[in-house]
Image (spheres, rainbow, N blue to C red):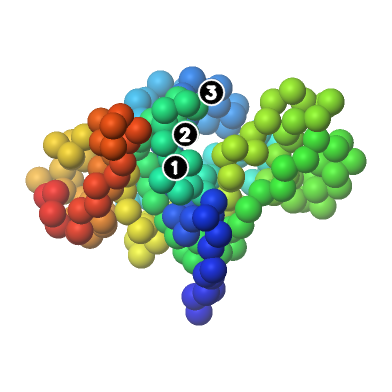
């Protein structure tokens, strides 16, 4: 049964994006070297071809997770234009993430809080940020996570859209056919030149970009 969400405020969004690359940020040690060197496009292509997202343990977590950013259009512009994120990724909705046992992380700089989460086996829900303990503030990510029971999250019936930045890009065909995930998903194309250089998304229905 779907979880029904609504009544979003102006700074909230129903859309959650898993970006396949986030600037030059270092990776968790659980991410294999062969994935670390892949471009955002290559990672997205592999996800689409496999029909699944490979999952790894975020920093401080003991479980593999699928990680997402809740983002409005204005926040998407901020992440892409100011924070170095690459406009390639998988888009899901709040309902889809909540149905899979996902939710928002807790941001805290208090060591007792972090320790309590970890001692309870819930370290994947807590992110150290800000304060005297850490000068780094991750709250701008508005992170959601799906802790998963397996090393891959199947994406069939879970994807709202696929985000790309080149409408002529296509994933590598599988058995001479474009992957089902590509053919059956909405495609969002990021256009950095739109709206006087602020950037905007053009949405295509499934099958429009085959």
- For residue 78, which numbered disc appears in the image? 2
Q: Which residue is mark 1?
A: 74
Q: Which residue is mark 3?
A: 25
Residue at 49 percent of width and 27 percent of height? 83
Residue 67 can be seen in this image: yes
Is tag 1's residue or tag 3's residue first in the polypeptide sequence?
3
Residue at 59 percent of width and 63 percent of height? 101
Q: Residues within 10 Å of mark 2 (few under 14, many from 20)?
A: some
* For residue 24, side relative to residue 89 (left or right): right
Q: SS class of the residue under badge 2?
A: helix
Q: Residues within 10 Å of mark 3 (few under 14, many from 20)?
A: few
Residue at 42 percent of width and 28 percent of height? 81
Is tag 3's residue or tag 2's residue first in the polypeptide sequence?
3
- Do residues under tags 2 and 1 come within 8 Å of each other at their CB atoms? yes
Name the image quarter holding residue 192. Answer: top left
User: Disc 2 to disc 1, how far (Cα)?
Assistant: 6 Å
* For residue 157, side relative to residue 127 (left or right): left
Q: Nearer the viewer, mark 1 or mark 3?
A: 1
Residue 163 versus residue 161 in the image, above or below:
above
């Amino acid at each position: 049964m779907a979880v029904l969400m609504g009544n979003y405020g102006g700074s909230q969004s129903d859309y959650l994006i898993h970006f396949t690359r986030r600037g030059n940020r270092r990776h968790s040690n659980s991410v294999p070297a062969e994935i670390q060197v892949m471009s955002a496009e290559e990672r997205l292509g592999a996800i689409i071809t496999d029909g699944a997202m490979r999952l790894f343990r975020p920093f401080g977590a003991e479980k593999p997770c699928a990680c997402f950013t809740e983002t409005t259009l204005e926040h998407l512009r901020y992440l892409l234009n100011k924070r170095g994120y690459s406009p390639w990724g998988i888009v899901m909705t709040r309902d889809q993430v909540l149905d899979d046992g996902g939710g928002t992380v807790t941001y805290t700089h208090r060591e007792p809080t972090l320790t309590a989460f970890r001692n309870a086996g819930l370290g994947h829900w807590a992110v150290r940020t800000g304060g005297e303990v850490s000068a780094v503030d991750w709250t701008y990510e508005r992170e959601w996570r799906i802790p998963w029971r397996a090393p891959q999250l199947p994406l069939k019936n879970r994807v709202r859209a696929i985000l790309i930045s080149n409408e002529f890009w296509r994933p590598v065909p599988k058995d001479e056919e474009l992957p089902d995930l590509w053919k059956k998903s909405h495609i969002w194309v990021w256009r950095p030149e739109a709206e006087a250089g602020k950037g905007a998304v053009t949405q295509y229905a499934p099958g429009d970009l085959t």
